[in-house]
Image (cartoon, rainbow, N blue to C red):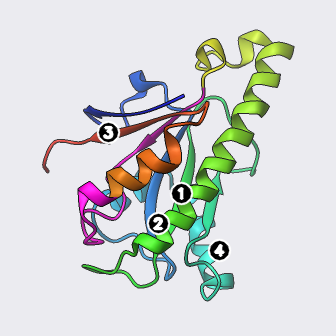
Amino acid sequence: MSFEIIQGDLFDPSHNFNALAQGVNTRGIMGSGIAVDFREKFPAMYEGYLDECSKHSSVLPGLLHTWYDEDGGVCVERPAVYNLFSQVHPGVGNASYELLERATYLMLQEAEDAMEVFKSYDELVPDLVPDLIDGQFRVGLPWIGCGVGGLKRYNVEHLFRRFLSDSEVEFVLVEQPER
């Protein structure tokens, strides 16, 4: 469907995002950048991420951790979170284009599957899914890997456009104001 870049706050509920994405490391540390905001806004997601890292850190690079709600089910009141394992170690300059590419592909598949689930909910119980406008599933993205991770925006934008532009899911990269 589309990939676009807008200015604003990734967490602004008026965007009607069904999911939000972020880049993470495999060591269970969300200690800087936008990851701190994710950790604070979604503490149950953070606990699930820590659990995933403690069990599987050696196999996580390039994979995806999806959080829907505290019970592990689809939640229509707040966005899901896609944690893209784009770096092994935390810290400056440790993100990898290869890992981000693999995780982006998995996020695309997960979002397309979630869109189909939401569409079926919308057909069965129309009032249950108020934010699914005309069957559209929206995912909000920051510049994954471009802050602390050290990736170049041009390359990340190219990667996102290549993978996400032809999807029925609407992917929106939100450029947040400088902190």
Q: Please tell me whether the stretch drawn in magenta is mainly helix, strand or loop.
A: loop
The secondary structure type at the circle numbered 2 is helix
Q: CA distance from mark 4 to mark 2?
A: 18 Å
Residues at discs 1 and 2 in contact (Cβ within 8 Å): yes
Give the residue pinned by disc 1: 104
- Label 1, residues with CA under 10 Å away: few <14, some 14-19, many ≥20: many
Q: Position of residue 56 (x, y in %)?
A: 67, 83
Question: Mark 1 or mark 4, which is nearer the start of the sequence?
Answer: 4
How far is the residue under mark 4 from the one under mark 1? 18 Å
Q: Are marks 3 and 1 in contact (CB under 8 Å)?
A: no
Q: Which residue is pictured at 57% across the width and 73% down the height?
A: 50
Q: What residue is disc 4 on? A: 52
Q: In this rendering, does residue 2 appear at all?
A: yes
Question: From this viewpoint, which residue is outermost toward the right?
Answer: 124
Q: Earlier in the sequence, mark 3 or mark 2?
A: 2
Cβ atoms under marks 4 and 2 closer than 8 Å: no
The residue at which mark 2 appears reads as 100
Given this view, does label 4 or label 2 mark the residue nearer the observer?
Answer: 2
Which residue is identified by label 3?
174
One can see residue 46 in this view: no
- Magenta segment: does it hold 33? no
- Stretch in magenta: 137-155
Residue drawn at 49 percent across, 38 percent down:
165
Residue at mark 3 to residue at mark 1: CA–CA distance: 16 Å
Label 4 to label 3: alpha-carbon separation: 27 Å
Lateral position of residue 30 relative to residue 80, left or right: left
Label whose residue precedes the other's in the sequence (4 or 2): 4
Q: Secondary structure at mark 1?
A: helix
Alpha carbon distance from label 1 to label 2: 6 Å
Which quadrant would the N terminus be assigned to in this image?
top right
Residue type for callout 2: Leu
